[in-house]
Image (cartoon, rainbow, N blue to C red):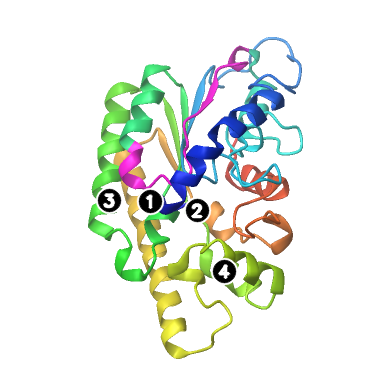
Amino acid sequence: MVRRWHLAALAVLAVFALACEAGAGGAGGSDPGPTGAPAKGYPSSMAALGDSITAGFGSCGTFLACSRNSWSTGSAEAVDSHYRRILAKNPKIRGKARNFARPGAEADALPAQVAQAIDMKAQYVTILIGANDACAAAPSGMTSVAAFRRDVDRALTRLKKGLPKAEVLVAGIPDLYRLWQLGRKDAQAVRAWQRFDTCRSMLADPTSTDESDDARRRQVRTRINDYNDELRQACDKYGARCRWDDDSHETSFNLDRVNRVDYFHPNVEGQAQLADATYERF
Protein backbone atom coordinates (compact mmCIF):
# COMPACT_ATOMS: atom_id res chain seq x y z
CA MET A 1 0.00 0.00 0.00
CA VAL A 2 2.54 2.53 -1.14
CA ARG A 3 1.38 6.10 -1.71
CA ARG A 4 2.01 7.96 -4.94
CA TRP A 5 4.92 9.96 -3.57
CA HIS A 6 6.83 6.69 -3.20
CA LEU A 7 6.34 5.67 -6.83
CA ALA A 8 9.35 7.56 -8.18
CA ALA A 9 11.62 5.66 -5.83
CA LEU A 10 9.89 2.42 -6.76
CA ALA A 11 10.50 3.11 -10.45
CA VAL A 12 14.23 3.31 -9.76
CA LEU A 13 14.00 -0.06 -8.00
CA ALA A 14 11.92 -1.69 -10.72
CA VAL A 15 14.89 -3.35 -12.41
CA PHE A 16 15.88 -4.97 -9.13
CA ALA A 17 12.30 -6.05 -8.51
CA LEU A 18 12.21 -7.78 -11.89
CA ALA A 19 15.48 -9.51 -11.11
CA CYS A 20 14.12 -10.65 -7.76
CA GLU A 21 10.99 -12.07 -9.38
CA ALA A 22 12.96 -13.76 -12.14
CA GLY A 23 15.18 -15.41 -9.59
CA ALA A 24 12.15 -16.55 -7.65
CA GLY A 25 10.69 -18.36 -10.59
CA GLY A 26 7.34 -17.86 -12.29
CA ALA A 27 4.00 -19.27 -11.31
CA GLY A 28 5.39 -22.77 -11.66
CA GLY A 29 8.63 -22.21 -9.74
CA SER A 30 7.77 -24.41 -6.76
CA ASP A 31 4.35 -25.70 -7.74
CA PRO A 32 3.00 -28.92 -6.30
CA GLY A 33 2.79 -31.74 -8.83
CA PRO A 34 -0.40 -32.73 -10.62
CA THR A 35 -2.76 -35.01 -8.76
CA GLY A 36 -4.47 -36.65 -11.74
CA ALA A 37 -7.66 -35.59 -13.48
CA PRO A 38 -8.82 -32.03 -12.68
CA ALA A 39 -11.38 -31.82 -9.90
CA LYS A 40 -14.70 -30.52 -11.13
CA GLY A 41 -15.35 -26.81 -10.72
CA TYR A 42 -11.78 -25.58 -10.23
CA PRO A 43 -10.67 -22.77 -12.59
CA SER A 44 -7.93 -23.21 -15.18
CA SER A 45 -6.70 -19.60 -15.05
CA MET A 46 -6.75 -16.76 -12.53
CA ALA A 47 -5.81 -13.12 -12.05
CA ALA A 48 -4.99 -11.11 -8.93
CA LEU A 49 -5.98 -7.42 -8.81
CA GLY A 50 -5.20 -4.82 -6.18
CA ASP A 51 -2.33 -3.05 -4.49
CA SER A 52 0.95 -3.79 -2.75
CA ILE A 53 -0.50 -6.39 -0.38
CA THR A 54 -1.46 -8.65 -3.27
CA ALA A 55 1.79 -7.80 -5.07
CA GLY A 56 3.65 -9.29 -2.07
CA PHE A 57 5.41 -6.00 -1.38
CA GLY A 58 8.07 -6.33 1.32
CA SER A 59 7.56 -10.06 1.81
CA CYS A 60 11.03 -10.96 0.48
CA GLY A 61 12.75 -8.84 3.14
CA THR A 62 13.30 -5.86 0.84
CA PHE A 63 11.33 -2.72 -0.04
CA LEU A 64 10.17 -4.33 -3.30
CA ALA A 65 7.27 -6.29 -4.73
CA CYS A 66 7.66 -10.06 -4.44
CA SER A 67 4.77 -11.73 -6.23
CA ARG A 68 5.91 -15.28 -5.49
CA ASN A 69 4.65 -14.66 -1.93
CA SER A 70 1.25 -13.30 -2.94
CA TRP A 71 -1.68 -14.76 -1.00
CA SER A 72 -3.57 -14.95 -4.30
CA THR A 73 -1.31 -16.10 -7.13
CA GLY A 74 2.01 -16.78 -5.43
CA SER A 75 4.08 -19.92 -6.00
CA ALA A 76 5.82 -20.04 -2.59
CA GLU A 77 5.14 -23.23 -0.68
CA ALA A 78 5.24 -21.39 2.64
CA VAL A 79 2.31 -19.19 1.60
CA ASP A 80 0.11 -21.89 0.04
CA SER A 81 -1.75 -19.32 -2.05
CA HIS A 82 -5.12 -19.71 -3.73
CA TYR A 83 -3.20 -20.59 -6.91
CA ARG A 84 -1.28 -23.44 -5.27
CA ARG A 85 -4.42 -24.85 -3.66
CA ILE A 86 -6.27 -24.77 -6.98
CA LEU A 87 -3.27 -26.24 -8.83
CA ALA A 88 -3.29 -29.22 -6.49
CA LYS A 89 -6.82 -29.93 -7.74
CA ASN A 90 -6.54 -28.74 -11.35
CA PRO A 91 -3.13 -29.02 -13.08
CA LYS A 92 -4.50 -27.08 -16.05
CA ILE A 93 -4.01 -23.83 -14.16
CA ARG A 94 -0.23 -24.30 -14.08
CA GLY A 95 1.46 -21.17 -15.42
CA LYS A 96 -1.89 -19.42 -15.94
CA ALA A 97 -1.97 -17.27 -12.82
CA ARG A 98 -1.17 -13.59 -13.37
CA ASN A 99 -0.66 -10.90 -10.76
CA PHE A 100 -1.74 -7.46 -11.98
CA ALA A 101 -1.72 -5.84 -8.53
CA ARG A 102 0.52 -2.78 -8.27
CA PRO A 103 2.04 -0.99 -5.27
CA GLY A 104 0.35 2.36 -4.80
CA ALA A 105 -2.83 1.38 -6.63
CA GLU A 106 -6.07 2.99 -5.51
CA ALA A 107 -9.59 2.05 -6.53
CA ASP A 108 -9.38 4.20 -9.66
CA ALA A 109 -6.68 1.83 -10.98
CA LEU A 110 -8.97 -1.18 -10.74
CA PRO A 111 -10.74 -0.84 -14.13
CA ALA A 112 -7.39 -0.97 -15.97
CA GLN A 113 -6.37 -4.06 -14.00
CA VAL A 114 -9.73 -5.64 -14.86
CA ALA A 115 -8.97 -5.06 -18.54
CA GLN A 116 -5.78 -7.11 -18.13
CA ALA A 117 -7.70 -9.92 -16.48
CA ILE A 118 -10.17 -9.89 -19.37
CA ASP A 119 -7.37 -10.01 -21.92
CA MET A 120 -6.00 -13.22 -20.36
CA LYS A 121 -9.53 -14.70 -20.05
CA ALA A 122 -9.17 -15.39 -16.33
CA GLN A 123 -11.69 -17.83 -14.90
CA TYR A 124 -11.09 -16.69 -11.32
CA VAL A 125 -10.33 -13.13 -10.19
CA THR A 126 -9.33 -11.91 -6.72
CA ILE A 127 -9.65 -8.26 -5.71
CA LEU A 128 -8.15 -6.55 -2.65
CA ILE A 129 -8.14 -2.76 -2.98
CA GLY A 130 -8.75 0.36 -0.91
CA ALA A 131 -5.99 0.75 1.68
CA ASN A 132 -4.22 3.38 -0.43
CA ASP A 133 -7.47 5.31 -0.75
CA ALA A 134 -7.42 5.67 3.04
CA CYS A 135 -3.64 6.06 3.45
CA ALA A 136 -3.32 9.74 2.59
CA ALA A 137 -1.10 12.45 4.04
CA ALA A 138 -4.09 13.47 6.15
CA PRO A 139 -7.72 12.34 6.43
CA SER A 140 -8.79 15.20 4.18
CA GLY A 141 -6.89 13.53 1.34
CA MET A 142 -8.71 10.21 1.56
CA THR A 143 -10.82 9.13 -1.40
CA SER A 144 -14.47 9.94 -0.79
CA VAL A 145 -16.78 7.00 -0.24
CA ALA A 146 -18.84 7.98 -3.30
CA ALA A 147 -15.77 8.15 -5.56
CA PHE A 148 -14.49 4.84 -4.19
CA ARG A 149 -17.80 3.11 -4.95
CA ARG A 150 -17.92 4.67 -8.41
CA ASP A 151 -14.49 3.27 -9.28
CA VAL A 152 -15.32 -0.17 -7.89
CA ASP A 153 -18.60 -0.28 -9.80
CA ARG A 154 -16.85 0.70 -13.02
CA ALA A 155 -14.38 -2.11 -12.54
CA LEU A 156 -16.94 -4.77 -11.64
CA THR A 157 -19.26 -3.73 -14.49
CA ARG A 158 -16.39 -4.13 -16.93
CA LEU A 159 -15.42 -7.45 -15.37
CA LYS A 160 -18.93 -8.89 -15.54
CA LYS A 161 -19.30 -7.84 -19.17
CA GLY A 162 -15.89 -9.13 -20.22
CA LEU A 163 -15.79 -12.32 -18.14
CA PRO A 164 -19.42 -13.21 -17.37
CA LYS A 165 -18.57 -16.76 -16.26
CA ALA A 166 -15.58 -15.92 -14.07
CA GLU A 167 -15.71 -16.47 -10.31
CA VAL A 168 -14.79 -13.33 -8.34
CA LEU A 169 -13.50 -12.87 -4.80
CA VAL A 170 -13.65 -9.40 -3.25
CA ALA A 171 -11.65 -9.27 -0.02
CA GLY A 172 -12.02 -6.73 2.78
CA ILE A 173 -9.43 -4.05 3.46
CA PRO A 174 -7.23 -4.97 6.47
CA ASP A 175 -7.80 -3.31 9.83
CA LEU A 176 -5.11 -0.61 9.92
CA TYR A 177 -6.34 0.75 13.22
CA ARG A 178 -5.61 -2.61 14.78
CA LEU A 179 -2.11 -2.52 13.30
CA TRP A 180 -1.54 0.86 14.96
CA GLN A 181 -2.77 -0.53 18.28
CA LEU A 182 -0.33 -3.41 18.04
CA GLY A 183 2.68 -1.34 16.93
CA ARG A 184 2.40 1.97 18.76
CA LYS A 185 4.43 0.69 21.74
CA ASP A 186 6.99 -1.17 19.63
CA ALA A 187 10.04 1.06 19.14
CA GLN A 188 11.12 -0.59 15.87
CA ALA A 189 7.66 -0.34 14.34
CA VAL A 190 7.37 3.31 15.34
CA ARG A 191 10.78 4.12 13.84
CA ALA A 192 9.88 2.38 10.59
CA TRP A 193 6.54 4.17 10.26
CA GLN A 194 8.23 7.51 10.86
CA ARG A 195 11.13 6.78 8.54
CA PHE A 196 8.93 5.84 5.59
CA ASP A 197 6.04 8.22 6.35
CA THR A 198 3.85 5.13 6.23
CA CYS A 199 0.09 5.71 5.92
CA ARG A 200 0.28 9.08 7.66
CA SER A 201 -3.48 9.46 7.94
CA MET A 202 -3.39 6.54 10.39
CA LEU A 203 0.22 6.21 11.57
CA ALA A 204 1.54 9.77 11.89
CA ASP A 205 2.64 10.53 15.48
CA PRO A 206 1.96 6.91 16.42
CA THR A 207 2.83 7.31 20.11
CA SER A 208 0.66 10.39 20.62
CA THR A 209 -2.31 10.07 22.96
CA ASP A 210 -3.75 13.48 22.10
CA GLU A 211 -7.47 13.49 21.45
CA SER A 212 -6.92 15.11 18.04
CA ASP A 213 -4.65 12.26 16.96
CA ASP A 214 -7.04 9.62 18.20
CA ALA A 215 -9.91 11.37 16.41
CA ARG A 216 -7.84 11.32 13.21
CA ARG A 217 -7.21 7.60 13.54
CA ARG A 218 -10.88 6.89 14.25
CA GLN A 219 -11.79 8.89 11.15
CA VAL A 220 -9.54 6.68 9.01
CA ARG A 221 -10.93 3.53 10.64
CA THR A 222 -14.46 4.69 9.86
CA ARG A 223 -13.54 5.41 6.26
CA ILE A 224 -12.07 1.92 5.82
CA ASN A 225 -15.22 0.42 7.33
CA ASP A 226 -17.28 2.49 4.88
CA TYR A 227 -15.15 1.27 1.97
CA ASN A 228 -15.67 -2.31 3.09
CA ASP A 229 -19.42 -1.75 3.24
CA GLU A 230 -19.33 -0.46 -0.34
CA LEU A 231 -17.21 -3.41 -1.49
CA ARG A 232 -19.68 -5.83 0.07
CA GLN A 233 -22.66 -4.10 -1.52
CA ALA A 234 -20.92 -3.94 -4.90
CA CYS A 235 -20.19 -7.66 -4.73
CA ASP A 236 -23.80 -8.41 -3.79
CA LYS A 237 -24.95 -6.33 -6.74
CA TYR A 238 -22.60 -8.27 -9.03
CA GLY A 239 -24.49 -11.47 -8.38
CA ALA A 240 -23.92 -15.10 -7.49
CA ARG A 241 -20.46 -15.31 -9.08
CA CYS A 242 -19.02 -12.73 -6.67
CA ARG A 243 -18.01 -13.78 -3.15
CA TRP A 244 -17.43 -11.16 -0.47
CA ASP A 245 -14.92 -12.16 2.19
CA ASP A 246 -14.30 -9.85 5.12
CA ASP A 247 -11.94 -12.25 6.88
CA SER A 248 -8.99 -10.28 5.48
CA HIS A 249 -10.24 -7.32 7.54
CA GLU A 250 -11.18 -9.29 10.63
CA THR A 251 -7.90 -11.24 10.63
CA SER A 252 -5.55 -8.81 12.35
CA PHE A 253 -1.84 -9.04 11.63
CA ASN A 254 0.32 -9.46 14.69
CA LEU A 255 3.65 -7.68 14.46
CA ASP A 256 5.32 -11.01 13.71
CA ARG A 257 3.19 -11.20 10.53
CA VAL A 258 4.41 -7.93 8.99
CA ASN A 259 7.84 -7.45 7.45
CA ARG A 260 10.74 -5.93 9.35
CA VAL A 261 11.42 -3.25 6.73
CA ASP A 262 8.32 -1.08 7.06
CA TYR A 263 6.33 -2.92 9.76
CA PHE A 264 3.28 -2.49 7.58
CA HIS A 265 3.07 -4.97 4.72
CA PRO A 266 2.53 -8.69 5.40
CA ASN A 267 5.58 -10.93 5.51
CA VAL A 268 5.44 -14.56 4.33
CA GLU A 269 3.52 -15.61 7.43
CA GLY A 270 1.10 -12.72 6.97
CA GLN A 271 0.53 -13.62 3.33
CA ALA A 272 -0.12 -17.23 4.37
CA GLN A 273 -2.62 -16.00 6.94
CA LEU A 274 -4.41 -14.00 4.24
CA ALA A 275 -4.53 -17.03 1.98
CA ASP A 276 -6.02 -19.14 4.78
CA ALA A 277 -8.55 -16.47 5.74
CA THR A 278 -9.85 -15.86 2.22
CA TYR A 279 -9.70 -19.24 0.51
CA GLU A 280 -12.86 -21.22 0.07
CA ARG A 281 -13.27 -24.51 -1.75
CA PHE A 282 -14.85 -24.12 -5.15
Does residue 261 appear to the left or right of 161 in the view shown?
right
Q: Nearer the viewer, mark 3 or mark 1?
A: 3
Q: Secondary structure at mark 2?
A: loop
Q: Amino acid at mark 1?
A: Arg
Q: Nearer the viewer, residue 60 or 83?
A: 60
Q: Which residues are magenta?
A: 92-110
Q: Residue at x 59, y 81 (%)?
A: 207
Q: How many angstroms separate mark 3 from mark 1 (CA)?
A: 10 Å
Name which residue type carries label 2.
Asp
Mark-to-mark CA distance, 2 and 4? 29 Å
Which of the labelled discs sits on residue 194, or is there none?
4
Image location of residue 272, percent across then percent down: 69, 44
* Mark closer to the chain start, 1 or 2: 1
Q: Secondary structure at mark 4?
A: helix
Q: Which residue is mark 1?
A: 232
User: Which numbered disc, 1 or 4, marks the residue closer to the eye?
Assistant: 4
State the residue lying farthest toward the front: 12
In this view of the protein, can residue 236 be seen by the observer?
no
Classify mark 2: residues with Cα within 10 Å, few (<14), some (14-19) or many (20+): some
Magenta-drawn stretch contains 103: yes
Check if mark 1's residue and mark 2's residue have beta carbons within 8 Å.
yes
**What residue is disc 2 on?**
246
Image height of 199 relative to 95, above or below: below
Amino acid residing under circle 3: Arg
The mark nearer the N terminus, 3 or 1, is: 3
The residue wearing badge 3 is 149
Q: Image quadrant for the C terminus?
A: top right
